[in-house]
Amino acid sequence: MRTVTLLGATGSIGSSTLDLVARNPERFRIHAVASGRDWAKLADVARASGARVAVIADEAGYAPLREALAGTATEVRAGEAAMVETAAEPVDLVVAAIVGAAGLAPTLAALEAGTTVALANKEALICAGDVMTAAARASGARILPIDSEHNAIFQVLEDVARISRIVLTASGGPFRCRSRAEMAAVTPAEAVKHPNWSMGAKISVDSATLMNKGLELIEAHHLFGVGPERLGVLVHPQSLVHGLVEYVDGSVLAQLGPADMRVPIAHALAWPERIATPVRRLDLAAASRLDFEEPDRERFPALALAEAALAAGGCRPCVLSAANEVAVGAFLEERIGFLEIAEVVADTLESLPAAPVTTLAEVAAADAEARARARSFAAQRARR
Ligand code: NDP
Ligand code: MG
C-alpha cells in the first residue's frame, strides 16, 4: 500500500491521477489532496478519495471547504504555509501537479523531506532546477517524471554516460501548418484546442506556441543531467512516439504509447512496478504512419527563446517561464494576440540582466521581477 499526497488534485493531471488511484484501491491510499481556489471541486475529490487532509491555497476557500466537508474525517487546511507543511508530511509519494510557479515551494518541501516526487509541475525544474535537484540529492529523494516526453525518456534511458542524444517529440500543436499571418488572428479557444491531448489551458497554449517544448528541454536538462548540445526536438504530429534516446553505438530506443496522460502517470505511480490502465491500446496498423519534421523556429520563436535561456542558465529559464505565464494569461483574457506571447517574453528577457540563482528566495525575486516587467510589456501591447 502506497500513501499518496496529490498537489493540484482538481486539475487535469490531478483528475487522471485520482482515476488511476480509484482503480487500484489495494495499492494506493490518498493522504492529502490540495488545490488553488476551487474549494467545491476539492471537497468532491476529498470525499471521493477519502483523503485525510484537504488543503486549499486560497484562504477565502477555508470556510466553504470546511462546511462542504462537515461530517467527514477530512481535516481542512488553508494557505500557502499549510500547503508546504502538508507536502512535507511523510508519505510514499507526492504527486506534484500544481500549475505554474505556485508549485515550487510545496515541491521543494517534499524533496527536502526525502519523499519521492512524481513530477508534473515542470515549472519547478524550469525555474529552480538546480535548487530542486540539489535538495533531492541531499535528502535522497527521487524525482519520477510524469510529463509524457520525460517519462518516455526515463523508461528508455539506461545510462546517461553512454548516450549521444535525447530527443523530445512535439505534436506541433493546433497551428503546426499555419502561417504567421494566420496565427496573428487566432483566438484562445482555438489555441486551447489541442489536436492530440486534453490538458489545462496554460499548457495547451504553451503547446500551440511550442514554448512547452522549449520548457521541456530545460526540464530534461535538470532531470537527466544532459547539456543542451545533447538535447533535441522533433515535431511528430501523431504524438505516438513520446521520446527517443540515441546511444553512442547508434541504437535508438523510443517509448511509444497512446496520447493519454494516464500512461505516464501510471508509470510514475507504480514504478518500478507497472499497473494496468484502461487506455485505448496503441494500434500502429490503424495509425499507419509516423511522421517527423524539424521544428520551425521562425514561425515558433518561443522555442528558440527557451533554447537560448537553457544555454544561458542562471535566472534566464525562470525569467522566461514567469514572463510566459503572464503573457499566456494576458492572451487567454484576450488582452494580447497569440504572436505577442513570444514578443512579451522576448521583451522581458531583453530587459533583465542574467544572474545566477542558487536559492528559492533568489528564484522568487527573479520570478517577481520578470512578472512585473512582463505585465507592463503586455499592457503596452494591449493599449495598441
Ligand atoms: P490544470 O490547470 O488542469 O490544473 C492546475 C491545478 O493546480 C489545479 O488543481 C489548481 O487548483 C492547482 N493550483 C493552481 N494554483 C494553485 C496554487 N496557488 N496552489 C495550489 N494549487 C494550485 O493544469 P494541468 O493539470 O494541465 O497541469 C498541471 C501541471 O502539470 C502543469 O505544470 C503542467 O505543465 C503539467 N503537465 C500537464 C500535462 C497535461 O496533460 N495536463 C502534461 C504534462 C505536464 P484549482 O483548480 O483549485 O485552482
Ligand atoms: Mg509534455
Image (cartoon, rainbow, N blue to C red):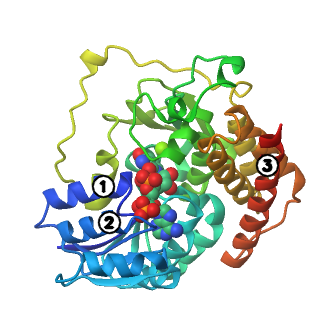
Assign a secondary structure to mark 2.
helix
Q: Residues within 10 Å of mark 2 (few under 14, many from 20)?
A: some
Asked if ligand 1 lies within 8 A of label 2, the reply is no
Rendering quarter of residue 232? top right
From the top left corner, tell me how far across and down residue 361 is, in percent.
Answer: 70, 78
Residue on which disc 2 sits? 40
Q: Earlier in the sequence, mark 1 or mark 2?
A: 1
Residue on which the image places disc 3: 379
User: Which element type, helix, strand or loop, lies under badge 3?
Assistant: helix
**Residue 147 shows in the view:** no
- x and y percentages locating residue 134 in the rendered image: 59, 74
Q: Residue at x 16, y 60 (%)?
A: 22
Q: Nearer the viewer, mark 1 or mark 3?
A: 3
Evaluate if marks 1 and 2 touch, with contact meaning CB atoms under 8 Å apart: no
Between the C-alphas of marks 1 and 3, the distance is 34 Å
Tell me the distance, in whole angstroms, between the alpha carbons under discs 1 and 2. 14 Å
Would you call the spot at circle 3 few (<14 residues within 10 Å), some (14-19), or many (20 or more)?
some
Q: Is residue 207 above or below residue 370?
A: above
Q: In the rendered view, would you say 311 is above or below 256?
A: below
The quadrant holding residue 25 is: bottom left
Q: Are marks 1 and 3 in contact (CB under 8 Å)?
A: no
Q: Amino acid at mark 3?
A: Ala
Q: CA distance from mark 3 to mark 2?
A: 33 Å
Name the one closer to the observer, 378 or 292. 378
Position of 333 with respect to 370 (left or right) is: left
Instruction: Tell me what residue is drawn at x 66 percent, y 76 percent.
Output: 360
Which residue is label 1 attached to? 15
Label 1 packing within 10 angstroms: few (<14), some (14-19), many (20+):
some
Q: Position of residue 332 (x, y in %)?
A: 59, 43
Foreground: 164 or 134?
A: 134
Going by the numbered disc 1, the residue's amino acid type is Ser
Q: Which mark is residue 374?
A: none
